[in-house]
Image: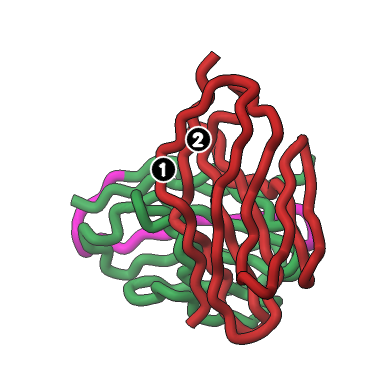
């Protein structure tokens, strides 16, 4: 079945550092790809998404590009803030299949 | 305010005692879903519903039941809870699975 693999955390960065969280996927069809974020004690919120190859999703300074050739959807941000500390989940939906989340990557940003 | 509500938020129960976790959304969404979140495993889909009276199994449906009699409600039923169902549960809704899912605040369940 479909699956999502994310880099293991936790990731600890200093404020204003560059962030990359790797995500790769396995799917039989043409999935939509998502990044969700979970702040402490809350439910998940959509951060960005992409629905087809070469699409770039972006929001709040975060970006991710749908790379079909490498089956990847890596999350990047040029300058992280303390308020970005959260757990980040890569996810996919393939038509007719279950919705699949990766295991999550915890990010801690230090002032 | 557009939202997904879940009740209860916290529940401690004993093995075998039937329980229901309610989920309601006010956004007229067709797609609703239940997930459980466990450390190191991310979120795993339990059941989902594409519309009223249409439900389907997710990746981990064993020990759970759902129903979708009305568009806004999607209760999760544990007929005979066991300790391995101790987890954090989230309900979510969206217009379709390719659209943004809105999540409830979560229900932390402990089965003793």
Q: What residue is drawn where x is 68% and y is 38%?
A: A77
In the rendered image, residue A78, in percent from the top left (x then y), is placed at 70, 34
Residue occupying the far top of the picture: A111
Relative vertical location of residue B28 with respect to residue A78 in this rendering, above or below:
below
Residue A35 lies in the magenta-colored region: no
CA–CA distance between discs 2 and 1?
7 Å
In the rendered image, residue B30, in percent from the top left (x then y), is placed at 74, 70
In the rendered image, residue A29, in percent from the top left (x then y), is placed at 65, 85
Q: What residue is drawn where x is 64% and y is 49%?
A: A75
In the rendered image, residue B86, in percent from the top left (x then y), is placed at 29, 53
With B72 as the anchor, is B68 left or right in this view?
A: left
Q: What chain is the green one?
A: B
Q: Which of B102 and A80 is in front in this view?
A: A80
Q: What residue is drawn where x is 63% and y is 33%?
A: A18
With B94 as the anchor, is A6 left or right in this view?
A: left
- In the picture of the structure, the residue carrying the numbered disc 2 is A107
Give the colour chain A carries in the figure.
red
Chain-order first, disc 2 or disc 1: 1
Magenta-tinted stretch: B12-29
**Chain label for disc 1:** A
Location of residue B67 by image quarter: bottom right
Location of residue B50 by image quarter: bottom right
Q: What residue is drawn where x is 62% and y is 75%?
A: B49
Q: Which of B103 and A73 is in front in this view?
A: A73
Question: How busy is the neighbourhood of tag 2: few (under 14 within 10 Å), some, or many (20 plus)?
Answer: some
Q: Is mark 1 on a helix, strand or loop?
A: loop
Q: Is mark 2 on a helix, strand or loop?
A: strand
Relative vertical location of residue B52 with respect to residue B3 in this rendering, above or below:
below
Give the numbered dot on residue A83. Answer: none
Relative vertical location of residue A14 with respect to residue A2 in this rendering, above or below:
above
With A14 as the anchor, is B98 left or right in this view?
A: right
């Amino acid at each position: 079945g479909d699956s999502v693999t994310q880099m293991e955390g936790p990731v600890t960065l200093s404020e204003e550092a560059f962030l990359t969280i790797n995500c790769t996927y396995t799917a039989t069809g043409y999935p939509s790809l998502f990044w969700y974020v979970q702040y402490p004690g809350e439910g998940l919120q959509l951060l960005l998404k992409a629905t087809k190859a070469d699409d770039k999703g972006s929001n709040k300074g975060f970006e991710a590009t749908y790379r079909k050739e490498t089956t990847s959807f890596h999350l990047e941000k040029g300058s992280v803030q303390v308020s970005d500390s959260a757990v980040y989940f890569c996810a996919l939906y393939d038509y007719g299949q279950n919705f699949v989340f990766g295991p999550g990557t915890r990010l801690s940003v230090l002032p | 305010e557009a939202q997904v509500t879940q009740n209860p938020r916290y529940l401690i129960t004993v093995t075998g005692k039937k329980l229901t976790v309610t989920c309601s959304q006010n956004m007229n969404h067709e797609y609703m879903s239940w997930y459980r979140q466990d450390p190191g495993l991310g979120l795993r889909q339990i059941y989902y519903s594409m519309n009223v009276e249409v439900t389907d199994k997710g990746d981990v449906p064993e020990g759970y039941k759902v129903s979708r009699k009305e568009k806004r409600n999607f209760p999760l039923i544990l007929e005979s809870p066991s300790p391995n169902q101790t987890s954090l549960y989230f309900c979510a809704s969206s217009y379709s699975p390719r659209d943004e899912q809105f999540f409830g605040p979560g229900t932390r369940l402990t089965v003793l």
